Image (spheres, helix red, strand yellow):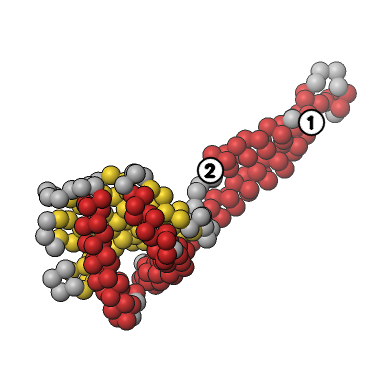
Amino acid sequence: MEVSRVSMKVLLFLVIIFPQTSADTHTLQFLYTALTPGENFTAVGLLDGEQIVYYDVNIRKMIPTSEWIDVADDRDVWKTQTQLMQSDQENLKQLLLTVMKDFKHTEGVHTLQRIYGCELDDDGTARGYDQYRYDGEHFLSLDLKTGTWIAAKDKAEITKEKWESTGHHAKYGKRYLEEECIKQLKKFLAPQYEIIACGFGPAPRVVEWIWVVMVTVGLLTIFIICVAGVPIWMKRKNDSKSVLTPGNPSSYK
């Protein structure tokens, strides 16, 4: 009974010390905003919520904002990103004008926003998304499972039908989010882990596991001592009772 109680206490302590934790998630996302009237356009790229790059509309070029990001990749990648962004700028501007006509909005300030990106868990699980908002309200989103666009408004059906008539937008978006985006995310994350490992000691996950091993070994040691010590303690207790029991002949020897 004593051994069972000790075992339960140690196991309970292990559960308290090491609760189940969800895998860490890393994200790479891009946010575009087109504003009318005028030629207003902004675009930023975020890694784990931190801005790493932005699009300078004056020189029509992608500019890295973090020091390490310039080392993270070769310059050809940023040239490619710049070309894609220039194309996306024109596409979003034209789409905004088209959507305004569909809503019969001929004047005033209107916005079209696009947010797309991918997520990667430590266990390898990957996800992606691509969404559009018109004047701050949900407009269109890409369903990666079916490879089709979902219209949030009746007017969005017009754009959806145009895009799905060729299937180009959905196929390209799905392939990018499931393949290229994940590759970019892994590439951008690599320098961070190198900096942590080489410049500032072991990576956080390594430190965490070292701590787990140390505490586990300590707890197992306590467990072994408790399990092995209970029978010895009980034997000594019984021997003590035997020695001090009145009328026991051996106690008077």
Which residue occupies the foreground of this view, 102 or 172? Answer: 102
Residue designated by label 1 = 239
Q: Residue furthest right?
A: 249
- Give the vertical position of 58 relative to 155 (above or below): below
* Residue matched to label 2: 19
Task: Please state the horizontal and vertical placement of residue 172, each as a whole percent of the image.
Answer: 42, 67
In the image, 35 versus 189, the foreground residue is: 35
Badge 1 element: helix
Front-most of residues 241 and 196:
196
User: Residue 56 vs residue 20: left or right?
Assistant: left
Sequence-wise, which precedes: disc 1 or disc 2? Answer: 2
Q: Amino acid at mark 1?
A: Asp
- Residue sitting at x 34%, y 55%: 159
Horizontal relation, residue 89 to residue 198: left or right: left
Residue drawn at (85%, 18%) of the image: 247
Residue 193, image x, y percentages: 41, 67
Q: Amino acid at mark 2?
A: Pro
